[in-house]
Image (cartoon, coloured by chain):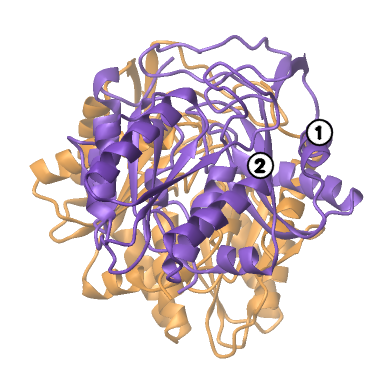
Chain colours: A purple, B orange
Amino acid sequence: MKMLMNVPETVVADALRGMAAAHPELTVDVEQRVVVRRDAPVAGKVALVSGGGSGHEPLHGGFVGPGMLDAACPGEVFTSPVPDQMVKAAAAVDSGAGVLFIVKNYTGDVLNFNMAAELAEDEGIQVASVLVNDDVAVTDSLFTAGRRGTGATLFVEKIAGAAADEGAPLERVEAIARRVNESSRSFGVALSPCSTPAKGSPTFDLPAGELELGIGIHGEPGRERRAMMTSHEIADFAVDAVLSDLQPTGPVLVLVNGMGATPLLELYGFNAEVQRVLGERGVVAARTLVGNYVTALDMAGASVTICQVDEELLRLWDAPVQTAGLRWGR
Amino acid sequence: MKMLMNVPETVVADALRGMAAAHPELTVDVEQRVVVRRDAPVAGKVALVSGGGSGHEPLHGGFVGPGMLDAACPGEVFTSPVPDQMVKAAAAVDSGAGVLFIVKNYTGDVLNFNMAAELAEDEGIQVASVLVNDDVAVTDSLFTAGRRGTGATLFVEKIAGAAADEGAPLERVEAIARRVNESSRSFGVALSPCSTPAKGSPTFDLPAGELELGIGIHGEPGRERRAMMTSHEIADFAVDAVLSDLQPTGPVLVLVNGMGATPLLELYGFNAEVQRVLGERGVVAARTLVGNYVTALDMAGASVTICQVDEELLRLWDAPVQTAGLRWGR
């Protein structure tokens, strides 16, 4: 598998150097692997810190900026960052109002963020943590006990970020983040496997005529494999998997997310089918976002995330955001 | 080649329906294949219309909105739109201040936009046209006489769009668009071929251990094939190809553009190498944009576009823009 890189060992550091060059509004510590908004700490504001393995870009570094994260800690590809990074990030962004850790539910991430929370509190930083576990495909998987954290991470980071931006205190930002996670469900499919730089070849096999329903963002197994389906059929399957679990009683946010290698042309086409199914099921899409946001390197495929919103969550979703990966308003 | 679609015949219409659902700020005519900003025509403003084959998304539909295009006409995949679409688009957005057609240099596009300009003028719409031909890789190619139009299209659409937004008259917007094109050069590489929905298989062969230097955005042949190179070596080759032609004497805009299937992690790493070469050659990158903007379906690879700017062009680049694919300020 050909990759646009030098050697696997420097892929993450190289990307961080390239990110620093493109984004003067960020402070990128390439050595310590911490991405921080340049104006941090923001006086009086609760700070949001997230992180996880690299390979899911723009998540999380691309979501650092006003209205979303204050800092991100990228680990090696598909590997949790270490507590040291998280503590450094927390120290860099804490204004005294406390720090919220947003943690995708993978065993390594949970362990390391827990350890980091203790270490940061030893340094006098008030820390709260929220776990994201939205993927309805499977309970327990290759790297997870319980549900995996996937697309809802974007909703949690954006909406909790807006609450923090408005001046909400730590317990309130934490409660909102938790509410967003509890109101969100995801389901993904893979049309092709992904290849990590270290391995240099596909991390799993997927026969030419089949797709994997319920794939994880590291290529972890889903529910089943089937003969290739149409966009219409995939949307039926994915949206019904989400709705059978969430059963929304009000308007929703929709994320139609590309896994990395699926063209935007196909993602928009898939969105047409997702919207059709939602309409047929009587679900109102208040806002829809289509694009590559929570990716799995060069995997082809897509996921659907749905988040039920009330007026407050919708207002926070619409609030201005200024990051490399997500930007609107102001 | 598996694709997230129903049947090849409806890929473009499906994508337009999905785009309409995600972007209430656009008016999408799925039947006529015209994407228009909802508030068009904007009183007194020169209108910008572009278009081309589908498969390069977010170009052009994703660049419709305040500060950039007023309308886009998507053709079939890798196929020019027809004059009818362009005339409809021009009529929908003309406020009386005239319309600028932004045309990538491919034989079909040039022919059809020329015909559309005549038809629109017959309807009393004042039309000017600017050709984008920035790709230094080859002169004459599979679909082109002269240089191909690629990444610089984004610079032309953004900067001319800002000039129109400021109230510049048609001849001034046209002159600025022409200046941006003349100040821009691009060079692209492919690590993998792309597959069109109609064909369902790769449009060209690229052996496992090789890359194509100077690829076009439809997979047209470039300068040469070589054994796979590192990101460092590719950046040297691509940037030198651009600089040997442009020889900038002042600061530049840099676009490090993904062809579609190359992960953002790799694109940022490639940007680090591009910036290194620019630094070594004494070229100052005033602004850098990294991401998938002018794509070739599921092709893996990247291109570098450089545009020399003066104070005016830089100010227009920095001006607010509100589109699905590019957004900042305001």
Q: What residue type is labelled 2?
A: Leu
Within 10 angstroms of label 2, few (less than 14), some, or many (20 or more) residues?
many
Q: Residue at x 80, y 51 (%)?
A: A248
Residue A286 location (% of width, % of height): 72, 62
Q: Which mark is residue A267?
A: 2
Which residue in the structure is indicated by mark 1? B7
Within 10 angstroms of label 1, few (less than 14), some, or many (20 or more) residues?
few
For the C terminus of chain A, give its image quadrant.
bottom left
Q: Which mark is residue B220?
A: none
Residue A294 location (% of width, % of height): 52, 39
Residue B110 location (% of width, % of height): 56, 55
Q: Residue at x 89, y 48 (%)?
A: A281
Q: Which residue is drawn at 42% across and 73% down?
A: B320
Of tags 2 and 1, the one toward the viewer is 2
Residue B149 location (% of width, % of height): 45, 49
Q: Is B155 left, or right, of B276 in this rendering?
A: right
Gap between marks 2 and 1, in whole Å? 14 Å
| SS category of the residue bearing label 1 | loop
